[in-house]
Image (spheres, coloured by chain):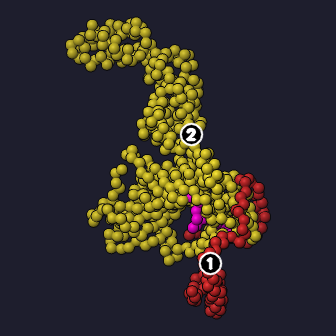
Amino acid sequence: MAIDNETVKRVAFLSRLKVEDDKIEPTKEEFNKILQWIEELNEINTDEVEPLISVNNVNLRMRNDEITTGNCREDILKNAPSAEYDYFAVPKVVE
Amino acid sequence: MAEYIIETAKGKWEVVVGLEIHCQIISKSKIFSGASTEFGDEPNTNVSFVDAGMPGMLPTLNKECVHQAIKTGLGLNAKINKYSEFSRKNYFYADMPTDYQITQFRYPIVGEGNICVDLSDGSTKNIGIERMHIEQDAGKSIHDLSPTKSFIDLNRAGVGLMEIVTKPDFRSPEEAGAFLRKLRSILRYLGTCDGNMDEGSMRCDVNVSVRPYGSNEFRTRCEMKNVNSVKFVMQAIENEAKRHIEVYENGGTVEQETRQFDPSTGLTKVMRKKEFAHDYRYFPEPDLPPLILTDEYIDSVKNEMIELPDAKKQRFIEKLGLTAYDAMVLCENKEVADFFEKAAAGHDAKKVANWMMSDFFAMLNKKHLEISQSPVSAENLGALVELISKEVISGKIAKDVFEIMSETGENPEKIVEEKGLKQVTDTSAIEAIIEKVIADNPDNVAAYKNGKTNLAGWFVGQTLKLSQGKANPQIVNKLVKEKLDN
């Protein structure tokens, strides 16, 4: 599988990343290098190998249903580029 | 069930509908964080750093959300999957701080199931459930506070959701409406979701397509997002089906698109075309290993299951002799069903049901009260029915007693005793009244004797009136005839 320039543009759009026109070609090359490397893995026979579901070979830890946090609005809003009336304020988004 | 066929000058059409319903899980804290799920608090107060998407914060699954999901799955007669996993669904929207939603994709926690719905003609239909998965809710955007900005409240971000996906089994708006009502009833019985569509704790996406009547094909469907009442869902199906038919009959093709239902017009308009459709690029959530459930755990949840509306309805019909309709109405809401059972205990259940279906519900409606606020307790309603069964009071007097009960909350025996409303069954007392009526109305007596026998009813009425409604009507009936025919 090889990536073309259109795919680079589409992935960039989906990721909301701006890729300048002169960077599309080099980005495509990089993508293809990564894919080629991954394709090498296909050469290995894995018929007898259980699929690896998670690299942390642990069971899912669950928490009890308790309220342990909250009421920290100031901290939550501290990183917001803009906040008004205790809300995050963003450019108008109406779909 | 009467078929829902849309007939035009050019032909007959059938509608094919599937629903996706998002149900907020009832839990104290969010599905992946320890922030409160309380609705209506000050903006951004119930938000943890996990919900706000701060770098490095890790989700931890809430046990209770899993428990509630299994209960719901069992309530949908569905398969509980011992293996399920979480995925990231990627999209950008201002109320989704992480830019991905943690959801379940390939392996949901609940598999295929079904729900039986009750239709207006008394028939039932089974609707297939495709799957149910758990995921996190997004925050809330407020668009009308400023002309240039949207405001975001993350209190809802991270609240647990169950997304129920049905099979495309609906063939009419009515079936979809009946399904939503039954689903809401089951969720409320189970206490896993409060089912309030107007508050957004249950939200419905509607998929509609049409096909020529009698065909088995599936044509292109359109999706209406977040339709927020049962009535609107039914309206959306009806109008969207009409739109499709018009397109086809004019030689056009329906495009797959997401549409928005406008409650003010009942019509739908395009929201998003297919070419702009989201590309969610799902991938396994690296922060959460798979969710593995044991048989022991699933069995323990099974043991917690309570009697659900269908089983209760069946029992009311078979064991208590109720009609299917009365049983259905009384079982829709668990509080109502519990009230009925309490009222009916030891008394004539069918009579208690009649009282609840008529005077009792009418009283609650008139006073704008929930059943939990009823001034008439279940015990007192049962006692009132008992007084009628034992012929202590007549049905007519019982209505007056009920009036007083709904004002004062007093028990009926006390009211009957204090107001002297006991039915007169003493024949000599009744005979005396009848004799008086006969003596006072010689003209009518003569007319009766000359063949106007339907005047007997008039004599009965006069006698009851004179007794202030306390004379036993059956006895009056019998005695009036005897006296007049003498």
What's the chain of the residue with tag 2? B
Give the drawing colour for chain B.
Answer: yellow
* Location of residue A13 in the rendering, given as x and y in whole percent from the top left corner: 60, 81
Circle 1: element type? loop
In the picture, one chain is red; tell me its letter: A
Let me know if residue B99 is in the magenta part.
Answer: yes
Circle 2: element type? helix
User: Are the residues under marks 2 and 1 on the same chain?
Assistant: no
Depth check: B17 or A36 in front? A36
Residue corresponding to mark 1: A46
* Location of residue B296 in the rendering, given as x and y in whole percent from the top left corner: 64, 52
Which mark is on residue B335? 2
Vertical placement of B348 versus B56: above or below? above
Left or right of A81 in this view: B255 = left
Amino acid type of the residue tagged 2 in the rendering: Glu
Which residue does the image show at 57% across and 67% down from the upper left? B106
Task: Report the span colored magenta.
Answer: B95-110
Q: Quadrant of residue B50?
A: bottom right
Count the numbered circles shown.
Answer: 2
Main SS category, magenta section: loop
Distance of label 2 from label 1 (alpha carbons): 57 Å
Which residue does the image show at 59% across and 37% down from the upper left? B372
